[in-house]
Image (spheres, rainbow, N blue to C red):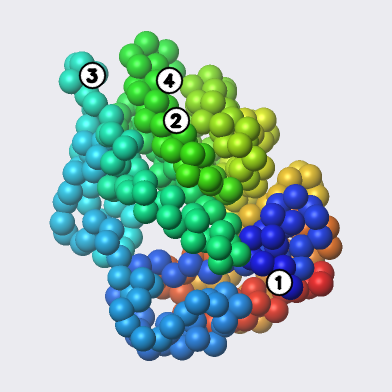
């Protein structure tokens, strides 16, 4: 049987993987919202998805060193103030570090030697972790902070300000873009030096309908940075993975041109028909399974039907399909269990 590493590589490269790579992530907020023993029981019952699960605490699944704590503001490494209303749920920027361009002369990026852009980072530990992953037959994975470019610019300036900056061709915007890119470029360099085999470039670009930035502005202000940040990983032979929430149909071609090899996009928001017509069999799809509709409000049978349809329409014996799901509070645990079972069942659909 292929190792996890070899199977993922074969799936990404259309080299006939033994099974469809599946990932099920439980958000930290879930441990405050569901009975702990119920989540543990689901994990214990689905060993394909949770092969390293152990029911004896303390466990990483039950703890989070994230600063996303309800009713507690904090300042991130870029100088933005952040808040959340629920432990473990992504924060909202309530004060933008560079809302006024007059503050640009004193504005500084974090130090990539000690910061990921969101939290402290230990590069020696990352290098050791990659070596351990390889020794265990897993991929050496790394990635830039979620929101490495567009969301960072939006957080620092404010989304509305950023849109005006782009529309007005504000010259100081280029200084900020260069600062953000330089920070990210050093992080990429360090990941490549550590031996990364799977390099992630997560940056949410989509809304419920359409992208958050126009295609023309993406091509002018963001795509060049994307290309320069991706190039070192590609040159080192690393797989390049890109995640974005939302409707990114108008940006996908540009993302692929920038060097993305595995595109992680949401299924129902972008549409299974569109994904099948435009991407299936042409680029590796890491499909983000619906979190808004069927898994939240549907039945276990509807969930099984959804996963089966997506596998049949977007996958093939040759590969090119991975699937991922993120569990958040509000989804019935019966549905979460049904989805786990469906993901395990259809992982071997083409085997």
State the image quarter where residue 135 is shown: bottom right
SS at circle 1:
loop
Task: Judge from the rendering whether residue 174 lies leftward or rightward of residue 114; answer left or right.
Answer: right
- Between label 4 and label 1, give the one nearer the viewer: 1
SS at circle 3:
helix
Q: CA distance from mark 1 to mark 2?
A: 36 Å
- Between label 4 and label 2, give the one nearer the viewer: 2
State the image quarter where residue 134 is shown: bottom right
Q: CA distance from mark 4 to mark 1?
A: 43 Å
Q: Is residue 291 visible?
A: no
Task: Judge from the rendering whether residue 265 lies leftward or rightward of residue 273; answer left or right.
Answer: left
Give me the disc on residue 185: 2
In the picture of the structure, the residue carrying the numbered disc 4 is 166
- Between label 1 and label 2, give the one nearer the viewer: 2
Q: CA distance from mark 2 to mark 3?
A: 21 Å
State yes or no: discs 2 and 3 in contact (Cβ < 8 Å): no
In the picture of the structure, the residue carrying the numbered disc 1 is 347
Q: Position of residue 147 (x, y in %)?
A: 42, 41
Q: Which of pointers 4 and 2 lies earlier in the amino acid sequence?
A: 4
**Residue plotted at (73% across, 45% down):** 283
State yes or no: discs 4 and 1 in contact (Cβ < 8 Å): no
In the picture of the structure, the residue carrying the numbered disc 3 is 104
Q: Which of pointers 4 and 1 lies earlier in the amino acid sequence?
A: 4
Q: Is residue 18 visible?
A: yes
> Is the residue 195 above or below the residue 54 in the image?
above
């Amino acid at each position: 049987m292929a190792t996890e590493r070899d199977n993922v590589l074969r799936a990404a490269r259309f080299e006939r993987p033994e099974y469809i790579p599946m990932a099920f992530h439980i958000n930290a907020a879930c441990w405050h919202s569901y009975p702990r023993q119920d989540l543990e029981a689901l994990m214990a019952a689905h060993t394909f998805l949770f092969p390293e699960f152990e029911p004896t605490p303390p466990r990483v699944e039950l703890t989070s060193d994230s600063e996303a704590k309800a009713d507690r503001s904090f300042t991130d490494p870029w100088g933005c103030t952040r808040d959340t209303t629920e432990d473990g749920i992504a924060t909202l920027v309530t004060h933008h570090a560079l809302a006024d361009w007059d503050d640009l002369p004193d504005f500084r990026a974090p130090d990539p030697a000690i910061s990921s852009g969101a939290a402290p980072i230990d590069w020696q530990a990352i290098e050791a972790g990659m070596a351990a992953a390889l020794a265990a037959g897993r991929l050496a994975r790394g990635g830039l902070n979620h929101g490495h470019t567009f969301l960072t610019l939006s957080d620092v300036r404010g989304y509305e300000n950023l849109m005006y900056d782009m529309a007005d061709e504000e010259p100081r915007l280029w200084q900020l873009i260069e600062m953000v890119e330089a920070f990210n470029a050093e992080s990429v360099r360090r990941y490549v030096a550590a031996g990364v085999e799977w390099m992630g470039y997560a940056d949410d670009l989509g809304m419920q309908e359409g992208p958050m930035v126009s295609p023309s502005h993406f091509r002018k202000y963001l795509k060049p940075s994307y290309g320069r940040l991706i190039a070192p990983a590609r040159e080192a032979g690393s797989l390049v993975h890109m995640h974005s929430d939302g409707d990114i149909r108008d940006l996908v071609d540009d993302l692929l041109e920038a060097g993305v090899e595995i595109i992680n996009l949401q299924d129902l928001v972008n549409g299974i028909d569109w994904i099948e017509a435009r991407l299936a069999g042409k680029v590796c799809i890491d499909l983000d399974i619906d979190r808004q509709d069927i898994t939240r409000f549907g039945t276990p049978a509807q969930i099984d039907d959804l996963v089966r349809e997506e596998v049949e329409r977007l996958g093939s014996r040759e590969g090119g399909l991975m699937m991922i799901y993120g569990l958040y509070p509000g989804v019935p645990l019966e549905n979460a269990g049904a989805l786990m079972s469906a993901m395990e069942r259809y992982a071997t659909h083409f085997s």
